[in-house]
Amino acid sequence: MAADAGFVNAPIPGMSLTTEPGNRPWENPPMLVTVEDALEFYAGRLISDTESHDAILEMLELQVPVQNVANILQKTSVMEGLHTIDVGILVAPAVEEMIMAVADMYGIRYAESMDQIMEGFVANPRAVRMAMRDLEKSMAEPEEETTALPEEPPMTEPMGLMSRPQKGMVE
């Protein structure tokens, strides 16, 4: 029954046809038509915009592969109507190189693909430090004494609407 909950909340077939054509960003002509335009956009956004560096570096520190970050960026741009999916696919390798250049500028270790993460190539230093700090805290703190729970009184007779009568009980 729990699997049906997602089905109930899903859009009705044909619901996308009830809005005015052109209201969605992807229904309009893209803003960046050529691969060169898209490269200029991503270079400006990735290399010179320091605000985007924080989000990208945070994802890389969480061991999200560079390929995945680049795919997220280009698919989001397609969804926003900046460029078409084919331009995004053609630009993706250059976007990956830009992301790696930003990570190298800040000295962040990264994995280019999921295969490198599966091989154990990248260890998240922040997660290791946090785990070590938690371990040291748990070893330094004295253990608290556990108090014994009070004993429950013995059960006398069943009570409630659905209780079964026992032998010797009168109904």
Image (cartoon, grey):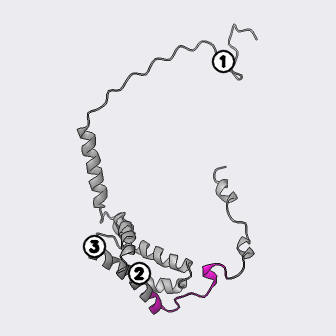
Q: Secondary structure at mark 2?
A: helix
> How many residues crowd around disc 1 within 10 Å: few (fewer than 14), some, or many (20 or more)?
few
- Disc number at residue 106? 3
Q: Nearer the viewer, mark 1 or mark 2?
A: 2
Q: Position of residue 161 (x, y in %)?
A: 71, 22
Q: How far apart are labels 3 and 1 at the CA level?
A: 69 Å
> How many residues crowd around disc 3 within 10 Å: few (fewer than 14), some, or many (20 or more)?
few
Q: Residue at x 46, y 91 (%)?
A: 37
Q: Position of residue 139 (x, y in %)?
A: 24, 40
Q: Position of residue 2 (x, y in %)?
A: 64, 50
Position of residue 128 relative to residue 157, above or below, is: below
Q: Residue at x 57, y 15 (%)?
A: 155
Q: Which residue is mark 1?
A: 159
Callouts 3 and 1 close, C-beta under 8 Å: no
Q: Is residue 77 magenta?
A: no
Q: Earlier in the sequence, mark 3 or mark 2?
A: 2
- The answer, for residue 86, to whether it is visible in the render is yes
Residue interval drawn in magenta: 22-39
- The answer, for residue 93, to whether it is visible in the render is no
Which amino acid type corresponds to the residue marked 3 in the rendered image? Tyr
Q: Position of residue 125 (x, y in %)?
A: 27, 60
Which amino acid type corresponds to the residue marked 1 in the rendered image? Met
Q: Earlier in the sequence, mark 1 or mark 2?
A: 2
Is 62 positioned to the left or the right of 81 in the image? Answer: left
Q: Which residue is mark 2?
A: 45
Q: Secondary structure at mark 3?
A: helix
